Image: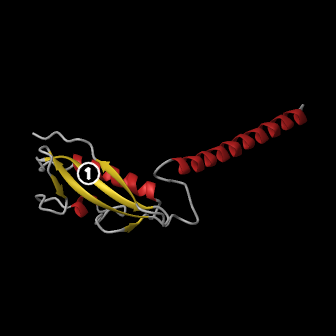
Amino acid sequence: MVASWAADVDRRRRLVRRVVVTTFVAFQLAFVVRAYSAPHREFGYQMFPEASTWRADIVRVTSNGRRLPIDDDWGDYRWNDLAGVRGLGSPWSEHHADAGLDNQLAFLGEALDWVAANTPDDVETSYLEAQVTSSRNGRPSETTILRSVMRDVP
């Protein structure tokens, strides 16, 4: 009876170990799949990163349709103070897309939305627009337009 009980405990331990290892491997595989399908590649290591470059001309589009570059007078706001992180500082000069072009463009789009939502003293801008010129791994340049969320302007 004692031997039967010990064998039963041993079987349960082996089953629990298998479940834990299988769950761990499944989570690791899910992280890898997510890394290749999401713009921000958390848990997705690539030994040889992209050799992509990008630059963006960002304008503020007013309610009457004027397009004002962000480096023009914009009250107390400066793009580099608002969104100078994650490689987004001075977007008008060419940058290397450190973690991949899709990742960098996703960060830029999120930054446009954040700046649009966090500039309350700007009463004339309806939305921000970035014309992004990028080259993926040395291929010919392509242009992408990113827009922020619309703002409530009086």
Q: Is residue 140 left or right of residue 61?
A: right
Using the image, determine if residue 12 lies above or below residue 33.
above
The N terminus sits in image quarter: top right
Against 89, is 21 above or below?
above
Residue 103 image position (x, y, % from top left) = 44, 55
**Position of residue 140 measured from the top left corner of the image (x, y, whole percent):** 45, 63
Seen at 55% across and 50% down, the residue is 36
Q: Which residue is mark 1?
A: 129
Name which residue type carries label 1. Glu
Q: How many marks?
A: 1
Residue drawn 19% across the image and 52% down it: 60
| The one of 149 and 136 positioned closer to us in this rendering | 136
Q: Is residue 59 left or right of residue 48?
A: left
In the picture, residue 20 is in which quadrant?
A: top right
Q: In the image, 18: left or right of 96?
A: right
Q: What is the x, y in percent for residue 48?
A: 57, 66
Residue, far top: 1
Q: Nearer the viewer, residue 20 or 39?
A: 39
Q: Give the structural element (helix, strand or loop) at label 1.
A: strand
